[in-house]
Each structure stands twice: as C-alpha cells, then as structure tokens.
Image: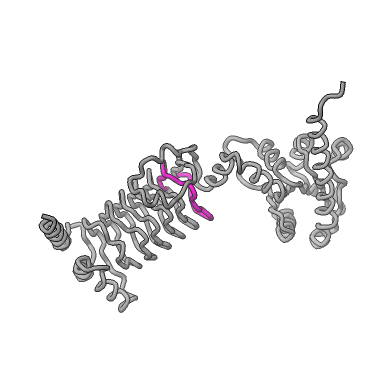
Amino acid sequence: MKGREQDSQEGDEENSITDLLAQPKSFSGKREHLRRFVDSLGEQDQKSWNQWRKKYPNVRPDLRGLDLTIQNIRGINLHRMNLGWARLEGAQLQALTSWEVNFADADLRWANLDGADLSLSVFDRANLQYSRFIKAILTDVSARKADFRHANLSHAVLNGAHLEGAKLRGARVVGISTWEIEVDGDTDQRELILEELGDFIEDWVDETDQGYKERVIGRVDHLEAVQLLYLLRNKHKLKTVIDAVTSNLVLILGNFSEERMKILRSVEMKLAQLRYAPVIFDFEMPSDRDLIETVSLLANLSCFLIVDLTEPASTPLETMLIAPQIGVPLAPIIQKGERPFSLFNSLQAKYWWVLPTWTYRNEKNLINNLETEIVDKCEKKRKLLRRRRHAELHRLASPSLH
C-alpha cells in the first residue's frame, strides 16, 4: 500500500513538472530557459540547472510570468534571475542564497523565505502578504509599493531597503534590523506587531505561525523605532536605554544659516571624535510636539548642551524657556565681537548649571579649545549635579527626625 502511495506521489510530481511547460499566456520569458528549469525540477538538488548557471554566469535566466505550482525549490540557484510577474504563491525558498533576483510584480503570498539571503533583489509591487522572512537577509532590496501586510519579518535584516509606498500594516517585526531604510509618506507602517523576543528557532520550526498572539506586547507605527520601543517596553532595559542616551547625547543650538551651520557642523564633528553623540537641532518637527517641547525633550536627555549665541535667531527664546526646566549643564559660546542677548546674564545668575559664556575668535580657535573650555567644564558640572541629586535622594529616603 505504501509503495502505491509513493508511486502515486511521484506520478503526481512528474505530471506537475510536465504541466509547467504549459505556461499561461502571461509567461513572457524565454522558452529555452523554461525547458532547462523544468527539466531540473525532476532532479535531486536541481543539479543540471545549477551546473548550467555556473558554466554561464553572465546569462540572466528570463522566466517572467512563470506559474510555479511545485513548492519546494529551495536548492535552486536563482541568482540574477528574472521572475517578474511570476506566480510563486506558497513557494518554499528557505535558506536560499541568491542575490539580485527580480521579483517585481510577483505573487509570493504565503511563501516561505525563512533564512534566505536575497540581498539587492527587487520586490517592487510584489504581493508578499502572509509570507515568512524569519531571519532573512534583505539588505539593499528594492521593495517600492510592495505589499508586506501580515508578513512575518521577525529577525529579518532590511538594512538599506527601499520601502517607499510599501504596505507593512500588521507585519511582525520583533528583532528586525532597519539601518538606513528609505520610506516616504505613502509607506504604511501602521499596527506593526511587536512581540516578546523569544527564540527565532522556535518560530522558524513552527511553520503554522500559531500562538504568536499570546506573545504580542504592543503595536508600533514606525519600523525604525521598533527596537527602541521594545527596549522602552521592557522594564528591565529601560534604565539601560536612559543611561546610554543621557551619558553621550549632546544637543547643539544656534543660528542655522549657511555660514553659522558650518561652524556648528565642525563642533558636531569634534564632539563625535571625543566619543559623544552630538545632535544639531535643525530637523523637521515631530507630529505631536511643538518646537519648545521638542527642544526640552532632547535637552533633558542630553548630558550637556552647547548654545551658540552668535547672531541669534530663535536661540534666545529656546534658551529662556528650557534653561529653567533642565538639570544638565548648558554651555553658552559666542564669537568675538558679538554680545549675548539681553537677559542672558540673568539666566546665568539664577540657574547655576548655566556656565559662563566662552568667547571664541574663529572656527579654528573654537575647535582647538572645545575640549578644555567647554567639554571638560561641562563634565565637571555634570558630576556636581549627579552628587547633588544623589544627596537629595538620600535625604528624602532617610527617616524623618522628630
């Protein structure tokens, strides 16, 4: 009985392979390449196809519009292959290593690409709904207007990916890497599913995708913020995040005209050389915070601030509003020949964490003396602030003496 079932299965597979040659009219690739591809599917490890690919590395197989009904092709070489408009629904491509594959406009719904390395491939406008990319490497892929809704992207590497106009709503994104991705206003990142980190091996083995709802800890709306929000959500990591940010972040305020920005950029570069993480406040406002709220938020996360009072624009208003609220050193600097705005002396007199104003002659003089005149003094003031905080906490924690 078992032998008959096996013969039946083998016969069904042979029929499926034969049926591949009868492609629909949508197939627009090369019939010669199709014949080679189909013939190899009946072999173990698709040996003849892979040998042909190795012998003719400059040939780019053209199988546009392929309708593939056989699922398991994980051992085949798809490097630089043109599978535009292909129908690959449910294809099993786990651990596949093939770069520069063209999947533009392809149907890859429910496909399994766990552990695949498809770097530099094209998924523009591809339908990837409910597909699996657990631990997949998708570095520098182009996936403009691709549909990743409800896909499992857990632990995937998407560094450098182009996701302009892509649909990612409801995708699972725990452990994802998204350095330097490109998104735009049309990229739908709503309701990304954040889970307990867990064991990706367990997810990899479990192809049913069952039980993940039990591990959901939240939903986020920005791919690049996934890791930060995961850490903030994890009470055991929150202290680490805050300590890491407040120990290195330096906020730089000043006039952002072209001439003044050149000097601020030099300060930024010097601080980076001194192992800080400098931020110049010259970016677009967040949706739910105004100018002052945003500056105050960054100021309170900084280890110290540098405020250039030369040719001030909005700097006086920013400084007047945030100086009373922060508990971090604020170092004012000004170029020779300029004078601080009125009332600034009052700020220095009232708030002891505002340092004396240091005057620099030119850009070179500023950079050469930045460490000794600004950084070292800010660090000294920072240590004093820390001691005072600890002393106050100790006082509040001590039993009342009555």
x 17%, y 57%: residue: 24
Determine which quarter of the picture holds residue 84. bottom left
Q: Nearer the viewer, residue 97 or 340?
A: 97
Residue 45 position (above or below residue 199): below
- The residue range painted magenta reads 166-187
Is 250 on the left or on the right of 350, as rendered?
left
Q: Is residue 259 visible?
A: no
The stretch drawn in magenta includes residue 239: no
Please tell me whether residue 51 is drawn above or below residue 110 in the rendered image: below
**Residue 114, x across and y down, in percent:** 38, 55
Q: Position of residue 279 (x, y in %)?
A: 68, 50
Using residue 277 as the reference point, say whether residue 170 is left or right of it.
Answer: left
Q: Quadrant of the C terminus?
A: top right
**Identity of the residue drawn at 44% across and 49% down:** 154
Q: Residue 262 appears at what percent x and percent y? A: 72, 57
- Please indicate whether residue 52 sits to the left or right of residue 366 in the image: left
Vertical relation: 288 (above or below) 272: above
| Residue 137 location (% of width, % of height) | 44, 59
